[in-house]
């Protein structure tokens, strides 16, 4: 716990979605404490298209200096969210590193809540809330699809501030800079541009293994858009396959654990299909995709070694 003045470097990982970045930057211009809390905003610019990358750079220049806040970018043209974040983190100066995706919007209390959390809580890493926009809460068809597929991240533990957590969701979190000295940076095999997912979960495991603490701060909240394009069978399959490949990369599961889990998921899928529990049916289906992707990846790796 510390009462020292914080300096917060806000890193926004982006593949170049300019209009979403603009929406996020606009929300950051409205946060409480903007003039009092030292912070800067940096886009980890992972746009692989030169024209798009230039548009992202131009956007940071447009917002740079507003209310005395620096806004800048670090280009990383090779695809990989973790690669872009890892390149950016050493170039920042804040004693706190706030990390978020480019498709969220911060609530007005977000910045002040992060500052207060690290002044008054003993934790080393903070997980902020990821909430559904009020207008999206009225879209019953999309809510039904979200219940079925769970292909978007919304995080609200309903616990008091400072509750200890065992995992992280990377769309909205903050880290004391010295944590990276103990854990290393993000695993570049994982996340978008890599195997596609789980870079935050894997990082959380290393945080805990290093004896550090992860804490919950509901006031450091962002809105995540309920995107219809991500609530479908194809995205469901893609997400769970990506999760399987990612988990294999850092867990290196054996055939002896993968094959029984595939068989178990098939049995459970059949059972819940008959008895009509939609959520459990899709959970079993997701686990099937997960372990099948693990098995495929394992076979490819073995073939590559033999070749």
Image (spheres, grey):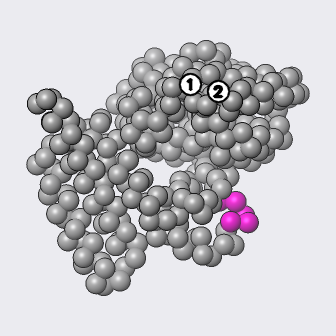
User: Where does the C terminus fall, quadrant-wise?
Assistant: top left
Point out residue 143 in the picture as x, y percentages from the top left corner: 58, 71
Tell me which segment is drawn in magenta: 132-136
**Residue drawn at x 38%, y 47% as measured from the top left:** 242
The residue that disc 1 covers is: 77
Q: Quadrant of residue 59?
A: top right
Mark 2 and mark 1 lie on one chain; the one further toward the N terminus is 2
Numbered tag placed on residue 280 in the rendering: none
The residue that disc 2 covers is: 50
**Residue drawn at x 19%, y 64% as measured from the top left:** 264
Point out residue 39 in the picture as x, y percentages from the top left corner: 74, 25
Secondary structure at numbered mark 1: loop
Q: CA distance from mark 2 to mark 1?
A: 8 Å
**Residue 134 is covered by the magenta coloring:** yes
Q: Nearer the viewer, residue 298 or 86?
A: 298
Point out residue 58 in the picture as x, y percentages from the top left corner: 78, 27
Q: Is residue 290 above or below residue 270?
A: above
Question: Does the image show residue 177?
Answer: no
Point out residue 281 in the picture as x, y percentages from the top left corner: 34, 73
């Amino acid at each position: 716990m510390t009462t020292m003045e914080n300096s917060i470097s806000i890193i926004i990982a982006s593949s170049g979605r300019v209009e979403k970045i603009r929406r996020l930057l606009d929300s950051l211009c409205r946060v409480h404490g903007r003039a009092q809390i030292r912070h800067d905003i940096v886009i980890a610019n992972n746009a692989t298209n030169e024209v798009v990358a230039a548009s992202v750079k131009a956007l940071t220049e447009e917002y740079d200096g507003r209310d005395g806040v620096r806004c800048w970018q670090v280009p990383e043209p090779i695809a990989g969210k973790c690669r872009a974040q890892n390149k950016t983190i050493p170039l920042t100066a804040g004693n706190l590193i706030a990390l978020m995706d480019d498709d969220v919007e911060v609530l007005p209390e977000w910045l002040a809540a992060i500052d207060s959390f690290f002044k008054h809580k003993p934790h080393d890493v903070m997980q902020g809330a990821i909430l559904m926009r009020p207008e999206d809460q009225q879209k019953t068809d999309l809510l039904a699809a979200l219940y079925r597929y769970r292909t978007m991240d919304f995080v609200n533990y309903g616990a008091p501030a400072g509750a200890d957590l065992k995992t992280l969701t990377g769309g909205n979190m903050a880290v004391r800079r010295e944590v990276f000295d103990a854990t290393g940076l993000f695993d570049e095999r994982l996340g978008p541009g890599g195997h596609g997912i789980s870079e935050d979960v894997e990082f959380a495991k290393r945080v805990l293994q290093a004896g550090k603490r992860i804490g919950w701060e509901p006031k450091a909240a962002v809105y995540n858009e309920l995107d219809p394009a991500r609530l479908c069978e194809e995205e469901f399959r893609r997400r769970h396959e990506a999760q399987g490949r990612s988990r294999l990369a850092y867990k290196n599961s054996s055939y002896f654990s993968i094959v029984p889990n595939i068989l178990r998921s098939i049995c459970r899928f059949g059972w819940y299909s008959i008895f009509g529990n939609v959520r459990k049916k899709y959970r079993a289906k997701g686990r099937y995709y997960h372990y099948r992707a693990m098995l495929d990846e394992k076979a490819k790796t073995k073939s590559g070694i033999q070749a």
